[in-house]
Image (tube, rainbow, N blue to C red):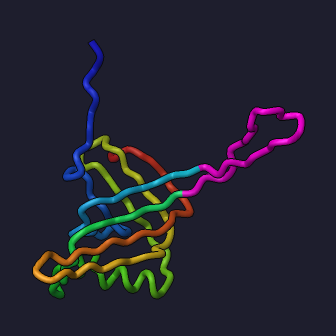
Amino acid sequence: MAAPVQTILGTSVRVYIGTILWGCAQSIKITGKVKKLEANCQGSGTTDVAFPGNDSWTFSVNGLYRQYDSTDETTNISVKDQIGSVQNKTEVTIKAEATATGGDVITGVGYFDSLDLDMPFNEIAKFASGGWFNSLVLSAKS
């Protein structure tokens, strides 16, 4: 009998910028792509020929817009921090880790390129931010 597949619930993943918890982040999406380098010529006939080029990585994070008091602000990432990172073009290290020992840790270093604030009347205010990674590493939590 095959071993059961271990799934990771989103509630078991923590998102950090550097070592500070992104307290109200509700989801993170990391997307990787490889550029396709087409190498078609007359000798290719009717078959497309391509080779892998550079890879690229992007991220997006969604969560609740929360304002922290001065005590909590030192231990949580806020929308104010994100605005500063976008305005100042600050390099950030973002880490998504499964809470279990031996769980996956994905660490990317890059920049924010977007921040959307949604503050609808009579609903919870939310944020969506995104950017790109110049490097990405997968490791196991010790």
Q: Is residue 63 above or below residue 116?
A: above
Nearest the eye: 124 or 4: 124
- Any magenta on residue 122? no
Q: Is residue 15 left or right of residue 114?
A: left
The span shown in magenta is: 34-56
Residue 130 visible in the picture: yes
Q: Is residue 37 left or right of residue 72?
A: right
Residue most extreme to the right: 42
Q: Is residue 126 above or below residue 36?
A: below
Residue 21 visible in the picture: no
Q: Is residue 29 above or below residue 21?
A: above
In which quadrant of the rendered image does the N terminus lie?
top left
Q: Which residue is pictured at 19% across the width and 83% down the height? A: 67
Residue most extreme to the front: 46
Query: How many numbered circles are shown?
Result: 0
Residue most extreme to the top: 1
The percent coordinates of residue 34 (x first, y second) are: 61, 49
- Any magenta on residue 38? yes
Nearest the eye: 55 or 76: 55
Q: Which residue is pictured at 38% across the width and 68% down the height? A: 18
Nearest the eye: 123 or 79: 123
The percent coordinates of residue 131 (x first, y second) are: 47, 69
The percent coordinates of residue 102 (x first, y second) are: 31, 41
Q: Which residue is pictured at 41% across the width and 52% down the height? A: 106
The percent coordinates of residue 134 (x first, y second) are: 56, 63
Q: Which residue is pictured at 30% across the width and 61% down the height? A: 15
